[in-house]
Image (cartoon, coloured by chain):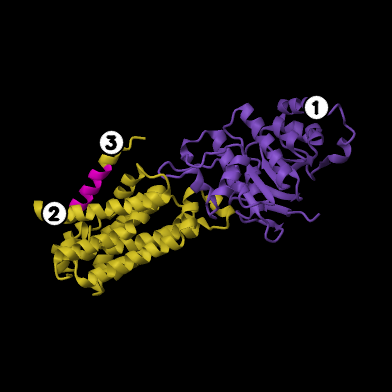
Chain colours: A purple, B yellow
Protein backbone atom coordinates (compact mmCIF):
# COMPACT_ATOMS: atom_id res chain seq x y z
CA UNK A 1 0.00 0.00 0.00
CA UNK A 2 1.27 3.48 -0.80
CA UNK A 3 2.05 5.34 2.40
CA UNK A 4 -0.14 8.39 3.08
CA UNK A 5 2.85 10.36 4.26
CA UNK A 6 6.44 9.41 3.73
CA UNK A 7 9.29 11.42 5.17
CA UNK A 8 12.94 10.77 4.53
CA UNK A 9 15.98 12.19 6.31
CA UNK A 10 13.88 14.89 7.94
CA UNK A 11 15.76 17.56 9.90
CA UNK A 12 14.29 20.69 11.47
CA UNK A 13 16.00 23.39 13.47
CA UNK A 14 14.34 26.43 15.01
CA UNK A 15 17.22 28.78 14.37
CA UNK A 16 19.23 27.51 17.35
CA UNK A 17 22.42 25.52 17.10
CA UNK A 18 20.91 22.17 17.95
CA UNK A 19 18.43 20.70 15.50
CA UNK A 20 15.06 19.79 17.02
CA UNK A 21 14.82 16.81 14.71
CA UNK A 22 17.66 15.17 12.89
CA UNK A 23 17.52 12.61 10.09
CA UNK A 24 14.11 11.19 10.86
CA UNK A 25 12.59 8.65 8.50
CA UNK A 26 8.88 8.20 8.95
CA UNK A 27 5.92 6.80 7.12
CA UNK A 28 2.30 6.06 7.82
CA UNK A 29 0.15 3.70 5.78
CA UNK A 30 -3.60 3.78 5.25
CA UNK A 31 -5.58 2.54 8.22
CA UNK A 32 -2.78 2.13 10.76
CA UNK A 33 -2.49 3.76 14.16
CA UNK A 34 0.98 5.11 14.80
CA UNK A 35 1.89 6.71 18.09
CA UNK A 36 4.89 8.94 18.61
CA UNK A 37 6.17 8.90 22.18
CA UNK A 38 9.07 10.78 23.67
CA UNK A 39 10.05 13.02 26.56
CA UNK A 40 9.32 16.75 26.63
CA UNK A 41 11.32 18.64 24.06
CA UNK A 42 11.98 15.53 22.02
CA UNK A 43 10.47 17.10 18.89
CA UNK A 44 7.17 15.21 18.84
CA UNK A 45 5.03 18.19 17.93
CA UNK A 46 7.69 19.46 15.54
CA UNK A 47 7.62 16.11 13.74
CA UNK A 48 3.86 16.34 13.36
CA UNK A 49 4.04 19.90 12.11
CA UNK A 50 6.80 19.00 9.68
CA UNK A 51 4.74 16.11 8.33
CA UNK A 52 1.81 18.49 7.87
CA UNK A 53 4.07 21.00 6.13
CA UNK A 54 3.69 23.72 8.79
CA UNK A 55 7.41 24.18 9.42
CA UNK A 56 10.25 24.51 6.96
CA UNK A 57 12.75 21.67 6.83
CA UNK A 58 16.49 22.15 7.07
CA UNK A 59 16.99 18.88 5.22
CA UNK A 60 15.07 15.91 3.89
CA UNK A 61 11.70 15.77 2.25
CA UNK A 62 8.10 14.92 3.05
CA UNK A 63 5.83 13.35 0.48
CA UNK A 64 2.11 13.35 1.01
CA UNK A 65 -0.36 11.46 -1.17
CA UNK A 66 -1.84 14.08 -3.52
CA UNK A 67 -5.14 15.42 -2.18
CA UNK A 68 -4.62 13.77 1.20
CA UNK A 69 -7.50 14.65 3.52
CA UNK A 70 -6.18 15.27 7.02
CA UNK A 71 -8.23 15.81 10.16
CA UNK A 72 -6.08 17.63 12.67
CA UNK A 73 -6.45 18.10 16.41
CA UNK A 74 -3.60 20.36 17.52
CA UNK A 75 -2.05 20.49 20.95
CA UNK A 76 -3.58 22.85 23.50
CA UNK A 77 -6.23 24.59 21.45
CA UNK A 78 -7.07 27.77 23.27
CA UNK A 79 -10.20 29.64 22.28
CA UNK A 80 -10.17 33.30 23.22
CA UNK A 81 -13.02 34.02 25.62
CA UNK A 82 -13.61 37.29 23.81
CA UNK A 83 -14.84 35.33 20.81
CA UNK A 84 -18.38 33.99 21.09
CA UNK A 85 -18.46 30.58 19.45
CA UNK A 86 -21.07 27.86 19.63
CA UNK A 87 -20.11 24.26 19.04
CA UNK A 88 -22.27 24.28 15.92
CA UNK A 89 -20.50 27.31 14.46
CA UNK A 90 -17.10 25.89 15.35
CA UNK A 91 -17.82 22.75 13.35
CA UNK A 92 -18.35 24.95 10.28
CA UNK A 93 -14.81 26.35 10.35
CA UNK A 94 -13.42 26.80 7.81
CA UNK A 95 -15.72 24.65 5.65
CA UNK A 96 -19.43 25.06 6.22
CA UNK A 97 -21.27 21.82 6.98
CA UNK A 98 -24.95 20.98 7.17
CA UNK A 99 -26.83 20.56 10.45
CA UNK A 100 -27.34 16.83 9.93
CA UNK A 101 -23.67 16.29 9.25
CA UNK A 102 -22.68 18.30 12.33
CA UNK A 103 -25.13 16.37 14.52
CA UNK A 104 -23.83 13.05 13.20
CA UNK A 105 -20.22 13.99 13.91
CA UNK A 106 -21.06 14.99 17.49
CA UNK A 107 -23.04 11.79 17.92
CA UNK A 108 -20.14 9.66 16.75
CA UNK A 109 -17.70 11.26 19.15
CA UNK A 110 -20.07 10.80 22.05
CA UNK A 111 -21.19 14.37 22.63
CA UNK A 112 -24.60 14.54 20.92
CA UNK A 113 -26.74 17.64 21.26
CA UNK A 114 -23.97 20.06 22.24
CA UNK A 115 -24.54 22.28 19.18
CA UNK A 116 -25.90 25.29 21.04
CA UNK A 117 -23.28 25.33 23.81
CA UNK A 118 -20.48 27.86 23.93
CA UNK A 119 -17.07 26.31 23.28
CA UNK A 120 -15.62 28.05 26.33
CA UNK A 121 -18.31 26.48 28.54
CA UNK A 122 -17.31 22.90 27.66
CA UNK A 123 -15.33 20.62 29.93
CA UNK A 124 -11.90 19.48 28.75
CA UNK A 125 -13.19 16.07 27.72
CA UNK A 126 -16.15 17.50 25.82
CA UNK A 127 -13.93 19.97 24.02
CA UNK A 128 -11.52 17.25 22.89
CA UNK A 129 -14.47 15.31 21.50
CA UNK A 130 -15.77 18.37 19.70
CA UNK A 131 -12.31 18.91 18.20
CA UNK A 132 -12.31 15.29 17.08
CA UNK A 133 -15.81 15.69 15.62
CA UNK A 134 -14.62 18.72 13.65
CA UNK A 135 -11.60 16.77 12.41
CA UNK A 136 -13.88 13.94 11.25
CA UNK A 137 -16.16 16.22 9.25
CA UNK A 138 -13.76 16.41 6.32
CA UNK A 139 -13.94 12.59 5.95
CA UNK A 140 -10.20 12.35 6.60
CA UNK A 141 -7.89 9.61 5.35
CA UNK A 142 -5.56 10.52 8.18
CA UNK A 143 -6.35 11.79 11.67
CA UNK A 144 -3.53 13.66 13.36
CA UNK A 145 -3.87 14.07 17.11
CA UNK A 146 -1.22 15.97 19.05
CA UNK A 147 -1.45 15.16 22.77
CA UNK A 148 -5.22 14.83 22.51
CA UNK A 149 -5.75 13.85 26.11
CA UNK A 150 -3.93 16.65 27.89
CA UNK A 151 -5.90 17.78 30.89
CA UNK A 152 -8.15 14.71 30.96
CA UNK A 153 -8.33 12.42 33.98
CA UNK A 154 -7.44 8.74 33.74
CA UNK A 155 -10.94 7.42 32.91
CA UNK A 156 -11.31 10.24 30.41
CA UNK A 157 -8.06 9.27 28.74
CA UNK A 158 -9.02 5.60 28.49
CA UNK A 159 -12.44 6.52 27.08
CA UNK A 160 -10.88 8.87 24.55
CA UNK A 161 -8.49 6.25 23.17
CA UNK A 162 -11.32 3.75 23.02
CA UNK A 163 -13.20 6.29 20.93
CA UNK A 164 -10.22 6.69 18.61
CA UNK A 165 -10.12 2.94 18.04
CA UNK A 166 -13.85 2.88 17.29
CA UNK A 167 -13.51 5.74 14.86
CA UNK A 168 -10.63 4.04 13.10
CA UNK A 169 -12.64 0.83 12.85
CA UNK A 170 -15.59 2.69 11.33
CA UNK A 171 -13.84 5.09 9.00
CA UNK A 172 -10.68 3.14 8.17
CA UNK A 173 -8.77 6.38 8.63
CA UNK A 174 -5.13 6.13 9.61
CA UNK A 175 -4.31 7.76 12.94
CA UNK A 176 -1.11 9.54 13.87
CA UNK A 177 -0.96 10.37 17.56
CA UNK A 178 1.52 12.13 19.76
CA UNK A 179 1.23 11.15 23.36
CA UNK A 180 2.84 10.77 26.69
CA UNK A 181 0.13 8.54 28.12
CA UNK A 182 2.42 5.61 27.58
CA UNK A 183 0.39 2.96 29.26
CA UNK A 184 -2.89 3.52 27.52
CA UNK A 185 -1.76 4.71 24.17
CA UNK A 186 0.52 1.83 23.46
CA UNK A 187 -2.31 -0.65 23.63
CA UNK A 188 -4.27 1.15 20.95
CA UNK A 189 -1.37 1.47 18.53
CA UNK A 190 -0.24 -0.72 15.67
CA UNK A 191 3.16 0.86 15.72
CA UNK A 192 5.03 3.05 18.19
CA UNK A 193 7.80 5.46 17.33
CA UNK A 194 10.02 6.50 20.19
CA UNK A 195 11.47 9.91 19.49
CA UNK A 196 14.20 11.94 21.14
CA UNK A 197 15.38 14.35 18.48
CA UNK A 198 15.95 11.31 16.34
CA UNK A 199 14.14 8.00 16.20
CA UNK A 200 15.40 5.88 19.10
CA UNK A 201 13.42 2.83 18.25
CA UNK A 202 10.19 1.87 16.61
CA UNK A 203 8.07 -1.18 16.11
CA UNK A 204 5.08 -2.90 17.64
CA UNK A 205 4.12 -1.68 21.11
CA UNK A 206 5.46 -4.90 22.65
CA UNK A 207 8.75 -4.55 20.87
CA UNK A 208 9.22 -0.91 21.76
CA UNK A 209 8.32 -1.35 25.39
CA UNK A 210 10.97 -4.05 25.62
CA UNK A 211 13.61 -2.03 23.78
CA UNK A 212 16.53 -0.85 25.90
CA UNK A 213 16.47 2.59 24.25
CA UNK A 214 12.85 3.08 25.22
CA UNK A 215 13.45 1.91 28.76
CA UNK A 216 16.44 4.18 29.10
CA UNK A 217 14.27 7.09 28.02
CA UNK A 218 11.27 6.42 30.21
CA UNK A 219 12.77 4.57 33.15
CA UNK A 220 10.41 3.07 35.63
CA UNK A 221 7.31 4.08 33.73
CA UNK A 222 8.56 1.90 30.90
CA UNK A 223 8.85 -1.03 33.27
CA UNK A 224 5.18 -0.57 34.06
CA UNK A 225 4.26 -0.55 30.39
CA UNK A 226 6.22 -3.68 29.80
CA UNK A 227 4.60 -5.43 32.72
CA UNK A 228 1.21 -4.45 31.39
CA UNK A 229 2.12 -5.88 28.04
CA UNK A 230 3.35 -9.12 29.42
CA UNK A 231 0.10 -9.39 31.29
CA UNK A 232 -2.17 -8.52 28.41
CA UNK A 233 -0.42 -10.41 25.71
CA UNK A 234 0.05 -13.74 27.42
CA UNK A 235 3.81 -13.44 27.45
CA UNK A 236 3.87 -13.59 23.72
CA UNK A 237 7.35 -12.41 22.87
CA UNK A 238 7.66 -14.25 19.61
CA UNK A 239 7.08 -11.17 17.50
CA UNK A 240 9.39 -8.97 19.46
CA UNK A 241 12.51 -9.71 17.52
CA UNK A 242 10.97 -9.10 14.13
CA UNK A 243 8.80 -6.17 15.16
CA UNK A 244 11.54 -4.16 16.72
CA UNK A 245 14.05 -2.16 14.78
CA UNK A 246 16.68 0.11 16.19
CA UNK A 247 17.29 3.54 14.82
CA UNK A 248 20.79 4.34 13.60
CA UNK A 249 21.86 5.88 16.87
CA UNK A 250 20.54 4.15 19.91
CA UNK A 251 23.21 5.37 22.22
CA UNK A 252 21.90 8.28 24.27
CA UNK A 253 23.79 10.94 26.14
CA UNK A 254 21.72 10.54 29.30
CA UNK B 1 -30.44 66.53 1.66
CA UNK B 2 -26.64 66.40 1.68
CA UNK B 3 -26.66 70.17 2.13
CA UNK B 4 -27.46 69.74 5.79
CA UNK B 5 -24.27 69.41 7.85
CA UNK B 6 -26.05 67.16 10.33
CA UNK B 7 -27.16 64.75 7.60
CA UNK B 8 -23.63 64.63 6.27
CA UNK B 9 -22.31 63.99 9.77
CA UNK B 10 -24.77 61.15 10.31
CA UNK B 11 -23.92 59.60 6.96
CA UNK B 12 -20.21 59.88 7.66
CA UNK B 13 -20.61 58.20 11.04
CA UNK B 14 -22.83 55.43 9.70
CA UNK B 15 -20.39 54.81 6.86
CA UNK B 16 -17.54 54.40 9.30
CA UNK B 17 -19.59 52.08 11.50
CA UNK B 18 -20.17 49.80 8.51
CA UNK B 19 -16.50 48.88 8.71
CA UNK B 20 -15.79 49.22 12.43
CA UNK B 21 -18.45 46.75 13.62
CA UNK B 22 -16.88 43.72 11.96
CA UNK B 23 -13.28 44.92 12.06
CA UNK B 24 -13.60 45.94 15.70
CA UNK B 25 -14.77 42.42 16.54
CA UNK B 26 -11.54 41.05 15.07
CA UNK B 27 -9.58 43.64 17.04
CA UNK B 28 -11.21 42.36 20.23
CA UNK B 29 -10.84 38.65 19.34
CA UNK B 30 -7.22 38.97 18.37
CA UNK B 31 -6.20 41.50 21.05
CA UNK B 32 -5.16 44.04 18.46
CA UNK B 33 -6.31 47.02 20.51
CA UNK B 34 -2.80 48.36 20.91
CA UNK B 35 -2.19 47.83 17.21
CA UNK B 36 -5.21 49.98 16.38
CA UNK B 37 -4.08 52.68 18.77
CA UNK B 38 -0.57 52.69 17.36
CA UNK B 39 -1.75 52.93 13.77
CA UNK B 40 -4.00 55.81 14.72
CA UNK B 41 -1.16 57.69 16.43
CA UNK B 42 1.07 57.15 13.44
CA UNK B 43 -1.66 58.66 11.27
CA UNK B 44 -0.79 62.10 12.65
CA UNK B 45 2.43 61.82 10.66
CA UNK B 46 0.24 61.14 7.64
CA UNK B 47 -1.73 64.32 8.30
CA UNK B 48 1.49 66.36 8.46
CA UNK B 49 2.82 64.77 5.26
CA UNK B 50 -0.46 65.43 3.47
CA UNK B 51 -0.20 69.12 4.29
CA UNK B 52 3.48 69.35 3.35
CA UNK B 53 2.89 67.69 -0.04
CA UNK B 54 -0.65 69.11 -0.47
CA UNK B 55 -2.22 65.67 -0.83
CA UNK B 56 -5.72 64.72 0.27
CA UNK B 57 -5.60 63.90 4.01
CA UNK B 58 -6.92 60.42 3.29
CA UNK B 59 -4.05 59.51 1.00
CA UNK B 60 -1.39 60.73 3.43
CA UNK B 61 -2.85 58.94 6.45
CA UNK B 62 -3.57 55.81 4.42
CA UNK B 63 0.02 55.68 3.16
CA UNK B 64 1.49 56.07 6.65
CA UNK B 65 -0.97 53.58 8.18
CA UNK B 66 -0.28 50.98 5.47
CA UNK B 67 3.47 51.50 5.80
CA UNK B 68 3.12 51.01 9.52
CA UNK B 69 1.18 47.75 9.06
CA UNK B 70 3.79 46.41 6.63
CA UNK B 71 6.75 47.37 8.82
CA UNK B 72 5.12 45.81 11.88
CA UNK B 73 4.48 42.58 9.95
CA UNK B 74 8.08 42.57 8.74
CA UNK B 75 9.65 43.22 12.15
CA UNK B 76 7.48 40.78 14.08
CA UNK B 77 8.20 38.09 11.48
CA UNK B 78 11.86 38.66 12.32
CA UNK B 79 11.13 37.77 15.92
CA UNK B 80 10.74 41.22 17.46
CA UNK B 81 8.09 41.49 20.14
CA UNK B 82 4.85 42.97 18.81
CA UNK B 83 4.44 45.20 21.84
CA UNK B 84 7.87 46.76 21.47
CA UNK B 85 7.65 47.21 17.71
CA UNK B 86 4.30 48.96 18.05
CA UNK B 87 5.51 51.16 20.88
CA UNK B 88 8.59 52.25 18.94
CA UNK B 89 6.81 52.85 15.64
CA UNK B 90 3.68 54.51 17.00
CA UNK B 91 5.44 57.04 19.14
CA UNK B 92 8.22 57.70 16.65
CA UNK B 93 5.62 58.37 13.97
CA UNK B 94 3.58 60.55 16.34
CA UNK B 95 6.68 62.54 17.32
CA UNK B 96 7.74 62.94 13.70
CA UNK B 97 4.21 63.97 12.86
CA UNK B 98 4.16 66.66 15.55
CA UNK B 99 7.56 67.92 14.39
CA UNK B 100 6.23 67.96 10.82
CA UNK B 101 3.11 69.83 11.90
CA UNK B 102 5.28 72.63 13.33
CA UNK B 103 6.45 73.37 9.78
CA UNK B 104 2.88 73.87 8.62
CA UNK B 105 1.66 77.05 10.33
CA UNK B 106 -1.97 76.60 9.22
CA UNK B 107 -2.08 73.12 10.76
CA UNK B 108 -0.65 74.19 14.10
CA UNK B 109 -3.97 75.69 15.09
CA UNK B 110 -6.11 73.03 13.47
CA UNK B 111 -4.35 69.96 14.85
CA UNK B 112 -7.09 69.38 17.38
CA UNK B 113 -9.48 68.52 14.56
CA UNK B 114 -7.29 65.55 13.70
CA UNK B 115 -6.77 64.44 17.28
CA UNK B 116 -10.45 64.51 18.20
CA UNK B 117 -12.14 64.62 14.82
CA UNK B 118 -14.66 67.07 13.47
CA UNK B 119 -17.58 65.08 12.17
CA UNK B 120 -19.77 68.18 11.82
CA UNK B 121 -17.38 69.59 9.23
CA UNK B 122 -17.35 66.66 6.78
CA UNK B 123 -17.88 67.60 3.14
CA UNK B 124 -19.38 65.65 0.26
CA UNK B 125 -15.87 64.70 -0.81
CA UNK B 126 -15.20 63.34 2.68
CA UNK B 127 -18.38 61.30 2.45
CA UNK B 128 -17.20 59.74 -0.80
CA UNK B 129 -13.85 58.77 0.75
CA UNK B 130 -15.46 57.41 3.90
CA UNK B 131 -18.07 55.30 2.14
CA UNK B 132 -15.63 54.02 -0.46
CA UNK B 133 -13.15 53.01 2.25
CA UNK B 134 -15.75 51.49 4.55
CA UNK B 135 -17.47 49.42 1.88
CA UNK B 136 -14.09 48.23 0.63
CA UNK B 137 -13.12 47.07 4.12
CA UNK B 138 -16.49 45.43 4.72
CA UNK B 139 -16.33 43.70 1.34
CA UNK B 140 -12.83 42.43 2.08
CA UNK B 141 -13.91 41.06 5.48
CA UNK B 142 -17.00 39.36 4.06
CA UNK B 143 -15.01 37.87 1.20
CA UNK B 144 -12.42 36.33 3.54
CA UNK B 145 -14.73 35.83 6.51
CA UNK B 146 -14.37 32.06 7.03
CA UNK B 147 -10.59 32.21 6.74
CA UNK B 148 -10.28 35.22 9.01
CA UNK B 149 -12.49 33.67 11.69
CA UNK B 150 -10.68 30.33 11.52
CA UNK B 151 -7.28 32.00 11.77
CA UNK B 152 -8.55 34.04 14.73
CA UNK B 153 -9.85 30.94 16.52
CA UNK B 154 -6.63 28.98 16.23
CA UNK B 155 -3.67 29.38 13.91
CA UNK B 156 -2.76 25.68 13.94
CA UNK B 157 -6.27 24.69 12.90
CA UNK B 158 -6.14 27.33 10.18
CA UNK B 159 -2.81 26.09 8.85
CA UNK B 160 -4.09 22.52 8.73
CA UNK B 161 -6.92 23.80 6.53
CA UNK B 162 -4.46 25.44 4.15
CA UNK B 163 -4.95 28.96 5.49
CA UNK B 164 -1.86 31.12 5.98
CA UNK B 165 -2.37 32.91 9.33
CA UNK B 166 0.30 35.51 8.53
CA UNK B 167 -1.53 36.53 5.39
CA UNK B 168 -4.87 36.86 7.22
CA UNK B 169 -3.15 38.92 9.90
CA UNK B 170 -1.73 41.24 7.25
CA UNK B 171 -5.15 41.60 5.64
CA UNK B 172 -6.63 42.70 8.97
CA UNK B 173 -3.75 45.15 9.47
CA UNK B 174 -4.37 46.67 6.06
CA UNK B 175 -8.11 46.89 6.72
CA UNK B 176 -7.26 48.64 9.97
CA UNK B 177 -5.06 51.11 8.08
CA UNK B 178 -7.96 52.00 5.80
CA UNK B 179 -10.32 52.45 8.75
CA UNK B 180 -7.83 54.71 10.53
CA UNK B 181 -7.51 56.83 7.40
CA UNK B 182 -11.26 57.30 7.00
CA UNK B 183 -11.96 57.73 10.71
CA UNK B 184 -9.47 60.47 11.39
CA UNK B 185 -11.85 63.20 10.16
CA UNK B 186 -14.75 61.73 12.11
CA UNK B 187 -13.55 60.79 15.59
CA UNK B 188 -9.88 61.76 15.38
CA UNK B 189 -6.67 59.86 15.97
CA UNK B 190 -7.18 59.50 19.71
CA UNK B 191 -10.65 57.97 19.59
CA UNK B 192 -10.46 55.65 16.56
CA UNK B 193 -9.63 52.66 18.74
CA UNK B 194 -12.67 53.41 20.86
CA UNK B 195 -14.94 53.18 17.80
CA UNK B 196 -13.44 49.78 17.07
CA UNK B 197 -13.35 48.28 20.52
CA UNK B 198 -16.21 49.69 22.59
CA UNK B 199 -19.17 48.61 20.37
CA UNK B 200 -17.59 45.18 19.85
CA UNK B 201 -17.01 44.77 23.58
CA UNK B 202 -20.63 45.75 24.25
CA UNK B 203 -21.85 43.26 21.62
CA UNK B 204 -19.84 40.42 23.18
CA UNK B 205 -22.19 40.23 26.16
CA UNK B 206 -25.18 38.99 24.23
CA UNK B 207 -23.68 37.28 21.19
CA UNK B 208 -23.45 33.53 20.65
CA UNK B 209 -21.52 33.50 17.37
CA UNK B 210 -18.88 35.66 15.70
CA UNK B 211 -21.45 36.82 13.12
CA UNK B 212 -23.90 37.92 15.79
CA UNK B 213 -21.14 39.85 17.52
CA UNK B 214 -20.06 41.64 14.34
CA UNK B 215 -23.67 42.47 13.47
CA UNK B 216 -24.54 43.70 16.97
CA UNK B 217 -21.34 45.76 17.11
CA UNK B 218 -22.36 47.45 13.87
CA UNK B 219 -25.80 48.18 15.27
CA UNK B 220 -24.42 49.51 18.55
CA UNK B 221 -21.99 51.66 16.59
CA UNK B 222 -24.84 53.09 14.52
CA UNK B 223 -26.89 53.86 17.63
CA UNK B 224 -23.84 55.54 19.16
CA UNK B 225 -23.29 57.71 16.09
CA UNK B 226 -26.88 58.90 15.98
CA UNK B 227 -27.12 59.26 19.75
CA UNK B 228 -23.80 61.09 19.94
CA UNK B 229 -24.80 63.54 17.22
CA UNK B 230 -28.10 64.14 18.92
CA UNK B 231 -26.39 64.75 22.26
CA UNK B 232 -23.86 67.01 20.63
CA UNK B 233 -26.66 69.05 19.05
CA UNK B 234 -28.79 69.43 22.18
CA UNK B 235 -26.12 69.57 24.85
CA UNK B 236 -23.58 71.41 22.74
CA UNK B 237 -20.90 68.79 23.42
CA UNK B 238 -18.09 67.80 21.00
CA UNK B 239 -19.49 65.25 18.53
CA UNK B 240 -16.69 62.64 18.33
CA UNK B 241 -16.29 62.21 22.09
CA UNK B 242 -20.10 62.19 22.51
CA UNK B 243 -20.37 59.26 20.08
CA UNK B 244 -17.75 57.32 22.03
CA UNK B 245 -19.42 58.22 25.33
CA UNK B 246 -22.76 56.79 24.12
CA UNK B 247 -20.93 53.61 23.09
CA UNK B 248 -19.35 53.37 26.51
CA UNK B 249 -22.74 53.84 28.16
CA UNK B 250 -24.19 50.97 26.08
CA UNK B 251 -21.22 48.83 27.12
CA UNK B 252 -21.87 49.62 30.77
CA UNK B 253 -25.53 48.64 30.39
CA UNK B 254 -24.63 45.30 28.74
CA UNK B 255 -22.24 44.59 31.61
CA UNK B 256 -25.13 44.85 34.04
CA UNK B 257 -27.82 43.20 31.89
CA UNK B 258 -25.81 40.35 30.35
CA UNK B 259 -23.94 39.02 33.34
CA UNK B 260 -21.97 35.94 32.35
Q: Which residue, given by chain and number where applicable, does mark 3 sit on? A: B256
> In the picture shown, does residue B60 fall above or below B30?
below
Q: Nearer the viewer, residue B151 or A137?
A: A137
Residue B245 included in the magenta stretch of the image: yes
The quadrant of the picture occupied by the N terminus of chain A is bottom right
Residue B232 is tagged as 2
Q: Is residue B60 left or right of residue A50?
A: left
* Magenta stretch bounds: B241-251
Q: Is residue B227 left or right of residue B74?
A: left
Q: Label 3 vs label 2: CA separation?
A: 26 Å
- Residue B176 lies, in percent from the top left, at 36, 59
Residue A232 is tagged as 1
Specify few, some or many for label 3: CA neighbours under 10 Å numbering under 14, 14-19, or 20 or more: few
Q: What kind of secondary structure does the magenta stretch mostly adopt?
A: helix
Residue sitting at 23 percent across and 65 percent down? B100
Name the element at disc 1. Answer: helix
Residue sitting at 37 percent across and 52 percent down? B214
Q: Are marks 1 and 2 on the same chain?
A: no
Name the element at disc 2. Answer: helix
Quadrant in the picture for residue B129 = bottom left
Q: Nearer the viewer, residue A98 or A194?
A: A98
Specify few, some or many for label 1: CA neighbours under 10 Å numbering under 14, 14-19, or 20 or more: few
Residue A165 included in the magenta stretch of the image: no
Q: Is residue B17 left or right of residue B119?
A: right
Amino acid sequence: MTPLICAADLSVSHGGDLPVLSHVDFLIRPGEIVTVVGPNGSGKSTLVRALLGHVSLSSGRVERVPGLRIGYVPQRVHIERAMPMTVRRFLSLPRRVGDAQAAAALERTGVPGLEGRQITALSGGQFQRVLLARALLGDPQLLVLDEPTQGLDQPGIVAFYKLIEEVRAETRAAVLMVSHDLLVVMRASDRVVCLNGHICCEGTPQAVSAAPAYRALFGSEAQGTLALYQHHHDHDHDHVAEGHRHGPACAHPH
Amino acid sequence: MLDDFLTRAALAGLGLVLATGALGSFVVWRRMAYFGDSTAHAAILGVALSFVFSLPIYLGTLAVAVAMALIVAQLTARGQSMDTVLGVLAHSALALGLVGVSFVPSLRVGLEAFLFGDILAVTRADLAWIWAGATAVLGLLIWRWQRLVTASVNEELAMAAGIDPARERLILSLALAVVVAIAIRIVGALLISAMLIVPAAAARGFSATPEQMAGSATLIGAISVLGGLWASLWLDTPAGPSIVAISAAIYAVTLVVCRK
